[in-house]
Image (tube, rainbow, N blue to C red):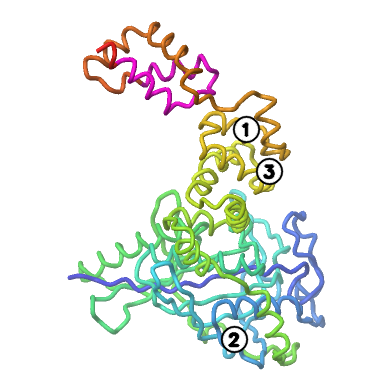
Amino acid sequence: MEYEVVIGLEVHVQLATESKIFCSCSTDFESKPNTNICPVCCGYPGVLPVLNRRAVELAVRVSLALNCKINKRVYFERKNYFYPDLPKNYQISQYELPLAQNGYIILPSLKKIGIERAHLEEDAGKLVHKGNYSLVDLNRTGIPLLEIVSRPDIRSADEAFDYLNYLKLTIQYIGASSCDMEKGYLRCDANISVRRKGGDILGTKVELKNMNSFRGVRDALLYEAKRQIKCLDEGKKIYQETRLWDEKLQKTQIMRTKEEAHDYRYFPEPDLPDFVINDDLIDKERTFIKELPIDKRARFIKDYSLGGREVDVFISNPALADFFEKTVEEFNQPRQVANWILGPLLELINSLGGGLSKVKITPANFSKVVKYFTEGKLNNLTAKKVLSLSIEDDRDIDAIIKEEGLLQVSGEDELLSFVDEAIKSSPKAVEDYLKGRGQAVMFIVGQVMKKTKGKANPKVVKQLIEGRLKEHG
C-alpha cells in the first residue's frame, strides 16, 4: 500500500529585543549563567510582568511578512506545567486568541504552505546535563519568542527543509531575528503522520523534538516516516507521543505520551491587561518589509538569467546579493559577475575567515577584475592574484596590475619565442600529440605559462602551439 506523509512544523523564533518580554533583564547570549535574572523572570511571589512593546512590534512585522491576519485584541494566558528550568511552574503564552493567524509562505516550487497561527510567549530556562546531575541556567527564562505554527500542508522531508529555509530567510530579511540556530534563536518541532494516499483522514500524529539543524529536521522526518509506514504494514498501532531525535544513532526514541491542550489548564493571565494592536503600529511595521527572499529569487532568475542553485546562494546572503547587483551596475555581464563572485571571491572569503565583513573591495573595483578578465587583459591566474591583493584593502586594480606587471601577454610576436622554446624542451609531449593524444598540448601550454610567469593568454598560446605542431606533422 502506498502512503502519504503529512507534516506540520512548529517554529520558535527569538525576537531581536535587548530585554526580555516581561521584564528589563538583558537577552545577551554571552552572559555568564544565571546573571540575567530578576524576581519577575524567576517568578517570585507578588511580582508583576510588563509587556515589552518592541517584542510586539517585531512579532507584528513577522506576521505581516507571513501574510497573516493580525488580531487587534491581544491577551495572554498561563500554560501550567512543571519543569526544572521553569521556576514559575507556568509559562505566559497565548492559546485561544493568538497575535496572528491564517497566513502562508510560498516555496520555490510555488507551493503555498499555510500558517495556522503565530503567537507570543516567554521562553523557559536551560538545563545543562553533567554526568549524573544537571545544572539550571535561567538566563533564557523570559526571552521573547514568536511561535509560528504551520498547517499540515507539507508532504515530504525536503519540502519541510525548504519551508524552514525560506521562513528563516524571511525573518532575517525583515530584521526581526538573526535566527542563529547555534544560539537557540530558532528551534523547530515537527508533527508527522502517515495515511493511505488519496485518503482524507489524518493518521495518528507524532511530535518530534531535539533537532538542532534543518538537516536534522529532514533526517528525523525521513526516519519517522519510514518507522510509521513499517508499523502500519505490520499491523501495529501508532501512538500519539513525543519522540526525541538521536543524532548519533540517526533514529527517534520515545520521550513521553503527548499532552493535550487541557493538560496545561490554560486560563487568562491575571497580571496582564488586554492589549490593542492599532493600525498605526501595523502600518509602521509594514514599512520594514521590502523585497522578500522568494520575490528576490524570482527576480534574480528572470532579470539575470541565473540558475536556481546559483540564485539560492545569493538569496541566503543578502549582503552578497547586494554586492552582486552593485557589481552588475558597474559591468553589465551578470553571468561573468556571478561566476567570479561564486567562485574566486567566495574561495578567498572562506580562506580569510570572518565572512563578507572581511571584504573591503568595492563593487566598482571588483567589477574591473571581472571586466579585464572578460576582455582578455587578465587571464584566470593573474585576475585571481589581483583580486587577492585588493580584497582586504580595496587597492586600485589598475595600480596593482602596473606594479606587479600582470597585464596579460596576448601578442603572437611576443609569445612565439616562448612557444618555440617550450616545444623544443618537451619532446615527449610533442610525440604524444603527433600520435593523436590531443591533451598532450596542455603540458606545453603549462610550460609557456611558467616561462611567462602566468601572464600569457592560454587560449592564444594553445592556438600557436597547435599551429607549430601541425607544421612539424
The stretch of residues the image draws in magenta is 442-469
* Residue type at the position of mark 2: Pro
Q: Quote the CA–CA distance across marks 1 and 2.
A: 56 Å
User: Does the image show residue 34?
Assistant: yes
Instruction: Please give the name of the residue rendered at 58% of the width and 77% of the height, measured from the top-left corner.
Output: 65
Callout 1–callout 3 Cβ contact below 8 Å: no
> Which is more foreground, mark 3 or mark 2?
3
Given the image, on which type of amino acid does mark 3 rest?
Ile
Q: Quadrant of the C terminus?
A: top left
Q: Which mark is residue 401?
A: none
Q: Is residue 441 left or right of residue 322?
A: left
Residue 70 in percent (x, y) is at: 61, 88
Judge by depth and name the residue closer to the eye, 151 or 57: 57
At label 1, counting other C-alpha atoms closer than 10 Å, the crowd grade (few under 14, some 14-19, many 20 or more) is many
- Considering every residue shown, the one lying at the far front of the view is 413
How would you rate the neighbour count of disc 3 (Cα within 10 Å): few for under 14, some for 14-19, many for 20 or more? many
Q: Nearer the viewer, residue 218 or 192?
A: 218
Amino acid under label 1? Val
Residue at the image position 67 percent from the left and 36 percent from the top: 397
Residue 386 badge: 1
Mark 3 lies on residue = 361
Q: Earlier in the sequence, mark 1 or mark 3?
A: 3
